Structures are given as structure tokens and as C-alpha cells.
Image: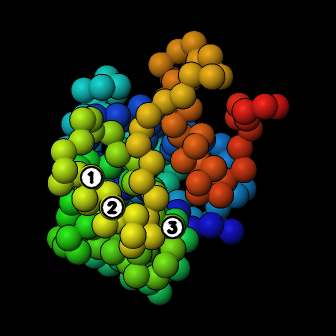
């Protein structure tokens, strides 16, 4: 069974976080712990982009960005996977530089030092050289950089279906078995 922590930062792309939470809750037989840490900016962006505050309605444990007693703030918590969705370039940069100034960056540091899976779903575009070097640093440290770049070969018809093309890829990377469009099938 998997122990997963989802971090939601203030980058645009709340639809990705919502879609991921919806799909993980629906696949609850594939994990035994699902925890969420969300920045205050992420809550504001969610409300702005989705016109609601339904993030609080999910049947998962939420942690404050200042709660360093959260189980995933230590390797002994044995969380297998961390997904940062959307991952702001500021968060990416702090992780790449080794700063653990909040629970998100501390948890990412723990996941990397324990050689577990860190998936950063970056949303910003275009990239500057600092972004590219930070992505390189994290890739070399073992993270997976998964830009929130949708695919269209499944012919998505709604914005939710477009977002799902990214989220389904993230779920594949996290080892969650899902039914989704598969190329050539």
C-alpha cells in the first residue's frame, strides 16, 4: 500500500489538484494514507479559478505548511510518494536549493533523501534559465519533473478532460492503476 502526500502551491492550475484528489479518493483501495498540505496562496487560487472552496471537503488529512510534526516531515513516516501539483517555480527553486522553510519543502527534502518518488507538476511557462537549472538539479536528485502539459490524442472535450490528460500521467508515475486512454490500444 502507498502513503502519498499531495502538496498544492499557489501556481495557477487548481483544476489539476482537484482532478488528482478526485481520482485518488476514487482509487482509495490503492493507498492507505493520503495527506495534503496546501499553501494559503493555493487556497486563494483554488477559490479564484474554481469558484469554490471544496478542497476542504475531501476525506483526507490536511496539514498546515508550518506543521513540522506531520508524519511526512520525517523519513520515519515512510511516505512513498510526494506529488506537488501545481508546483510553483518558487517552490521548485527552494527545493532545488535545499531550503526546508515550510512543510512542503521539508517533505520534498525528506522524499529525496530517502530516495522515494517526488513528482513536481510544474505549471509556469515560459521557463527562464534559473527554472531550467532548478529542474535539472531536482532531476539529478531523483525527482520527476512533469510539466502540466496536456495531450490531445484522446480528443478531450471539456477542460476537465484536458486536465485529466496531465493528472492521469501523474497517477501513472505514482504507480496508481487507472483506466485512461492508452496510445495504440
Residue 58 appears left or right of 64: right
Quadrant of residue 98 in the image? bottom left
Whether tag 1 and tag 3 are in contact, CB under 8 A, the answer is no
Instruction: For marks 1 and 3, give the one nearer the viewer.
Output: 1
Residue assigned mark 1: 132
What's the CA distance linking mark 1 and mark 2? 6 Å
Q: Which mark is residue 145?
A: none
- Mark nearer the N terminus (1 vs 3): 3
Whether tag 1 and tag 2 are in contact, CB under 8 A, the answer is yes
Residue 137 appears left or right of 164: left
Nearest to the observer: residue 38 or residue 87: 87
What is the tally of numbered marks visible in this picture? Answer: 3
Report the residue that reaches farthest toward the bottom. 76
**Residue at 39%, 73% in the rendered image:** 141
> Would you say residue 184 is visible in this rendering?
yes
Q: Residue 26, percent across and down?
A: 65, 43
Residue assigned mark 3: 117
Q: Residue 15, percent across and down?
A: 41, 31
Q: Quadrant of the N terminus?
A: bottom right
**Residue at 58%, 43% in the rendered image:** 169
Q: Residue 157, percent across and down?
A: 57, 13
Residue 155 vs 67, above or below: the answer is above
Q: Residue 128, percent across and down?
A: 18, 45
Quadrant of residue 84 in the image? bottom left
Q: Quadrant of the C terminus?
A: top right
Neighbours of disc 3 within 10 Å: few (<14), some (14-19), many (20+): many
What's the CA distance linking mark 1 and mark 3? 20 Å
Neighbours of disc 2 within 10 Å: few (<14), some (14-19), many (20+): some
Amino acid at each position: 500500500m502507498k502513503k502519498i502526500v499531495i502538496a498544492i502551491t499557489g501556481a495557477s492550475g487548481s483544476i489539476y489538484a482537484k482532478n488528482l484528489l478526485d481520482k485518488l479518493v476514487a482509487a482509495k483501495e490503492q493507498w492507505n494514507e493520503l495527506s495534503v498540505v496546501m499553501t494559503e496562496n493555493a487556497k486563494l487560487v483554488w477559490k479564484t479559478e474554481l469558484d469554490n472552496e471544496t478542497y476542504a471537503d475531501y476525506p483526507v488529512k490536511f496539514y498546515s505548511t508550518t506543521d513540522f510534526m506531520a508524519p511526512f516531515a520525517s523519513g520515519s513516516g515512510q511516505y512513498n510518494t510526494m506529488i506537488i501539483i501545481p508546483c510553483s517555480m518558487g517552490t521548485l527553486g527552494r527545493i532545488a536549493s535545499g531550503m526546508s522553510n515550510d512543510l512542503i519543502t521539508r517533505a520534498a527534502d525528506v522524499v529525496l533523501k530517502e530516495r522515494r518518488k517526488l513528482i513536481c507538476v510544474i505549471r509556469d511557462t515560459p521557463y527562464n534559465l534559473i527554472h531550467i537549472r532548478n529542474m535539472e538539479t531536482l532531476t539529478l536528485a531523483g525527482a520527476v519533473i512533469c510539466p502540466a502539459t496536456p495531450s490531445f490524442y484522446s480528443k478531450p472535450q471539456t477542460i476537465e478532460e484536458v486536465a485529466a490528460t496531465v493528472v492521469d500521467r501523474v497517477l501513472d508515475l505514482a504507480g496508481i492503476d487507472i483506466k485512461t486512454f492508452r496510445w495504440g490500444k
